[in-house]
Image: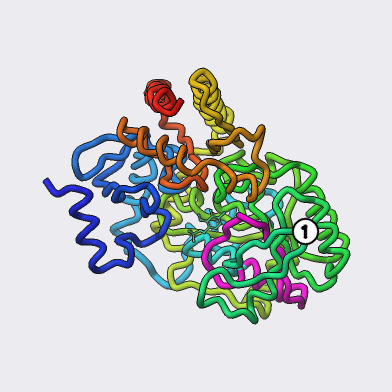
Amino acid sequence: MTTSAELFELASRRIPGGINSPVRAFKGMNRPPVFMERAQDAYLFDVEGNRYVDYVGSWGPMITGHADRDVLAAVRARLDNGLSFGAPTAAETTMADLICEMIPSIDMVRMTSSGTEATMSAIRLARGYTGRDKIVKFEGNYHGHSDSLLVKAGSGALTHGVPNSPGVPAALAEHTVTLSFNDPDGVEACFEEIGDEIAGVIVEPVAGNMNCIPALPEFLETLRRVCNEYGSVLIFDEVMTGFRVAMGGAQAYYGVTPDLTCLGKIVGGGMPVGAFGGSQEIMEQISPLGPVYHAGTLSGNPLAMAAGTTLLNKVQVPGFHDALSQRVETLCNGLKERADAAGVPLVVQSAGGMFGLFFTAQSRVDNFAQATACDPEAFRHFFTGMLDQGVYLAPSAFEAGFMSSAHTAEDIQHTLDAAEKVFASMA
Ligand code: PLP
């Protein structure tokens, strides 16, 4: 048998860090990543034959569980027709219709091959539409790895961007203004100062890349109001929240309507897909109707459309999200009760089908500063203890957890039993 440790060593010779996306590394967890062999329903199976109840779900797409039979059947049915044509297919219109029905703020939509491309293109569109350069993002929000959005947060109400990744030109980063998440006053102050230079505001309405931090309703309402007032484009990055926190995404969950929405993950059913869409007036600025360029060799790929439309049809079944949220609640309440009983300080937060665990004595966590004030050692201990008992959590204290409809009551009970043991060892 080849072990994960051996595979990691081999991978590390040819692939920087041994992984193709940093979130997969177990750096900081003091062990090599687990190499997976296959997945089914709520479970991952590693190369050593171990089974894990999975709360990563490929970082979000697997909302009905792994290897969903309907999704696989749809992909198989398309497979023999060819993988990609570089010409339009009816499947793209089916997908567009479905997205527009499920998210009413979207009149028109373009497909991409990743969430990064979706946010990058939405930013370009906001800039092209308004004729302005500056964008606002929030500390701890992640929108993919395009240059304009890889800007680290500063503290304070108004921080002009600085690059946090070498390779991002300072001249570009200076157009990205980073503000504190869930701070309506900071947003107001920023707009009062430079509102007429701001092309758009991009936000994760439930921040899932600094653990799980739902926006406060008044924060999103302030964003909507100032964008209206100053003619800036409000962009909801729903790559993670889309079809997960509610059928219509976070905008349905909160009742706040953005101008543009970015999608990914679930919209591709596990294939490499993203999308961005919004009002017809803005979307008509996209090439070839308008001057703002967007393209992609594999955008709207027929297999990806088959997987994505099949999954979207499954999640729009009435009651799907209520049942998903119920599972999250059972898990979160059970974890909180067990942590309290063991005297382990834990804050549990959730929105629809996503949740977060913060090892902290704070009463709640609303922003990046509070998220980074949590106890990293406690998380590491918890993560390791859970992994050893067959529960796969994200290997980082700054990632949300994802529930699927394939998680059974027994899976959740197994998770709670495992957690009880780990909490006992932490007390
Ligand atoms: N936006 C959000 C909110 C995300 O969580 C991610 C990825 O996790 C992205 C954008 C980037 O998507 P991708 O990894 O498909 O490029």
State the residue in front, 29 or 286. Answer: 29
Locate residue 372 relative to residue 383 in the image: left or right: right
Locate residue 108 relative to residue 259 in the image: left or right: left
State the residue in front, 302 or 137. Answer: 137
Locate residue 11 relative to residue 25 in the image: left or right: left
Residue at the location (52% across, 38% down)? Answer: 315
- Total numbered labels: 1
Quadrant for residue 82, please give it.
bottom left
Does the magenta-highlighted stretch encompass residue 125?
A: yes
**CB of residue at label 1: within 8 Å of ligand 1?**
no
Q: Is residue 275 above or below residue 307?
A: below
Mark 1 residue type: Ala
Q: Which residues are magenta?
A: 122-148
State the residue in front, 340 or 100. Answer: 340
Outermost residue, left direction? 1
Residue at the location (57% across, 74% down)? Answer: 294
Residue 318 seen: no
User: What crowding class fits label 1: few (fewer than 14 Cα within 10 Å), some (14-19), or many (20 or more)?
Assistant: some
Residue at image mark 1: 157
Residue at the location (39% across, 45% down)? Answer: 71
Outermost residue, top direction? 341
In terms of secondary structure, where does tag 1 sit?
Answer: loop
Q: Is residue 270 above or below residue 358?
A: below
Residue 2 seen: yes
